[in-house]
Image (cartoon, rainbow, N blue to C red):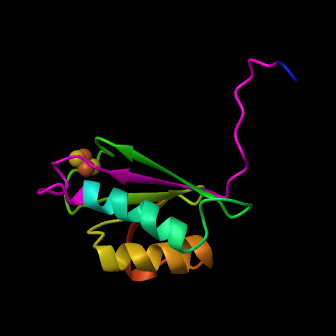
Amino acid sequence: MGDATQAQMEPYSRHVLVCTGNFCSPDRRGRQIYSLLAELLEQEGLLFGPQRVKRGETPCLGVCSNGPIVVVYPEGTWYSEVTPALLERIVIEHLKHGNPIEEAIFHRL
Ligand code: FES
């Protein structure tokens, strides 16, 4: 503890992973969703502070159909066919207000 070489990180509330691979969604739609996620998190004030949401992209989440696939932790809430409009709902309703979009969830941890 207190070691200058220790990795450090600010607290955060949730972690969102977006599949940017080509098998679950063609035409780079996963990449578009990943880029839009950054904009929406900033717009909703979720990039800093106690409600901070971390994001990450991955080449595959092991689903490989009906993408783009997005998963929210720590709940382990999996969303499929994430359009820009659905992503906006996920950010505002789930990440900001804690209410998952039930009809868009296909799996839970
Ligand atoms: S390529 Fe997206 S889940 Fe496998």
Question: Which residue occupies 17% across, 57% down?
Answer: 25
45 sits left or right of 10 in the view: left
In the displayed orientation, state which residue is furthest to the left.
27
Q: Is residue 79 magenta?
A: no
The residue depicted at 16 percent of the width and 49 percent of the height is 23
Residue 4 is at least partly visible in this image: yes
Percent x, y for residue 18? Answer: 37, 53
User: Taking 43 as reference, is 8 above or below it?
Assistant: above
Tell me, yes or no, whether the highlighted magenta stretch contains residue 20.
Answer: yes
Relative depth, front residue between 49 and 95 = 49
Q: Is residue 63 visible?
A: no
Magenta-highlighted residues: 4-30
Determine the image quadrant of residue 96: bottom right
Q: Nearer the viewer, residue 103 or 11?
A: 11
Can you tell which quarter of the image residue 4 is in? top right
Q: Main secondary structure of the magenta part?
A: loop
Q: Is residue 9 above or below residue 74?
A: above
**Above or below: residue 20 compared with residue 92:** above
Residue 105, position in %: x, y?
40, 71
Side of 15 relative to 68 (left or right)? right
Where's residue 102, x and y in %?
A: 45, 80
From this viewpoint, which residue is outermost toward the right?
Answer: 2
Q: Nearer the viewer, residue 24 or 106?
A: 24
> Is the N terminus in the top left, top right, bottom left or bottom right quadrant?
top right
Residue 37 on image: x %, y %: 42, 63
Residue at 35 percent of width and 57 percent of height = 34
